[in-house]
Image (cartoon, rainbow, N blue to C red):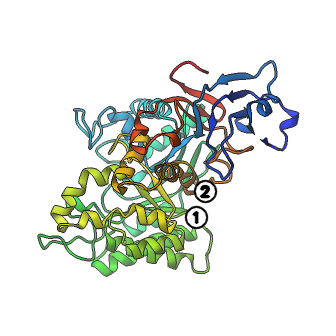
Amino acid sequence: MRAAGDSTRGVADLVLRGGVVRTMTEQDPATAIALRGGRIAAIGTDREVLALAGPATGTIELAGRAVLPGINDAHLHATWLGALWPRTLFGSGSGDPRNPLRTNEQRRAAILRAGDLLASLGITSYTEPGLGPGEDAGPTGAFGSPVVAQYRELAAEGLLKARVTVLSLYGELDGRSSLPDVLAGLESDRASADPRWLRFAGIKIFADGIPPMRSACTKCGYADGSSAGLLVDGIDDADREHNLTRMIVAAHRAGLQVGVHATGDRSIEVVLNAVELAGVGHGADLGHYIIHGDMASSEQLRRMAELGVGLDVQPGIALCTGEQVDAVLGAGAAAESWRLGEALEFGVRMCVTSDAPVLSPDWRRQIAAADEWLGPAEDPRQRTAQLLRCCTVEPARQDGAASWKGVLAPGMAADLCVLAADPLAVAPAELPDVEVDLTVVDGRIVHDRTGIG
Ligand SMILES: [Zn+2]
């Protein structure tokens, strides 16, 4: 049995036994897990773990269910999702996609609604990638500073059902930003009463748009002869590149994480150059990452692996927009984009994310989409394991939290996703049919589909 150092002195709050515990570590799967005080107290056989049970300990019979680390969606617009759901941008559902949130009550309700939805999916952590003054006048009301205020209130009241990482936004969503605004924003207050629940990690920058809209900043132009530059303000291309570089370097030197929306191979190049420059003489690993990265080339993916730059991908977007990408960039362009297999092979820190409400927040569908995009696997089990890492281990690293969440081990956060069946026993395409039966955050049950808790 593996137990936390002080485990012999305490009785477990909750024991889950009789299942398959997928720790996402090198350790073999165990059958039982004990939780205490919001942390994992022990993992082992039923017999070993039940030794920590006392009269007040709750016991859950897993009956063959699988326990995973809580799922972490590294790129998910929860407030906007809460306003729109069940509508998604690429899915069905009617109504205005902006559905503006006008009041603080509406924003609070949207965050809470998303919290319930995400808990039902086993999601225990997520990143809100871009909240701040840049969107105070935005059309949705789901990204401005008042949303940050609501998160602070809900965290203080203990009402969040998932741990939240926030990237601050000092420009417009999918739009322009200016160097002075970003530099001023770096000085903002990022304190949090409890960073394990709400953490202000750094900044979000939009480098460019997206290929289907011909707004991705690419090395080659589009089939119709058009081309697109960076979204960052500047008098010409060189000035825009310089300003984006300065934003990234300045944030790094301020000790902040940078997540850059970059889809074109040219914008990706600028970001990688900037991260490399920022790291010279200031080697701290702040977990900078590229969001989407559609057109990242093989060479760029190798550089990302070397530099430790992460990649947040949405395989469902590749499936939905591949044809449009071929139409605007030329036949075969989609197949050259979203090189997820190479990213995995080269060891890029890749997170599989939903970008909800662009796609459904259901991570099981994202894993199935990744599998479909990658094509037939030699070893489906190994692929599922690899993709599950992209929803647990890698996002924890992106959060700068690998020391306390993302895997199941004694002392780690008691954040669990309990599935009706072992995900490694089904093909990735079948994963969406495996129910999420129980979700535990910080040792607290926040979703119990079948009443086992
Ligand atoms: Zn997004």
Residue 139, image x, y percentages: 28, 44
Give yes or no for contact between labels 1 and 2 (Cβ–Cβ under 8 Å): yes
- Which residue sits furthest front? 378
- Read off the residue under disc 2: 400
- Read off the residue under disc 1: 286
Q: Quadrant of residue 399?
A: bottom right
The C terminus sits in image quarter? top right
Residue type indicated by callout 2: Gly
Residue 78, image x, y percentages: 42, 40
Q: Is residue 102 visible?
A: no
Q: Is residue 422 above or below residue 278?
A: above
Q: Is residue 394 visible?
A: yes
* Residue beneath the point at 45% across and 70% down: 247
Crowding around mark 2 (Cα neighbors within 10 Å: few <14, some 14 to 19, many 20+) is some
Q: Is residue 360 above or below residue 375?
A: above
335 and 352: which is toward the camera: 335
Q: Is residue 70 above or below residue 291?
A: above
374 and 355: which is toward the camera: 374
Disc 1 Cβ-to-ligand 1 distance below 8 Å: no
54 and 244: which is toward the camera: 54
Residue 332, image x, y percentages: 22, 67
Q: CA distance from mark 1 to mark 2?
A: 7 Å
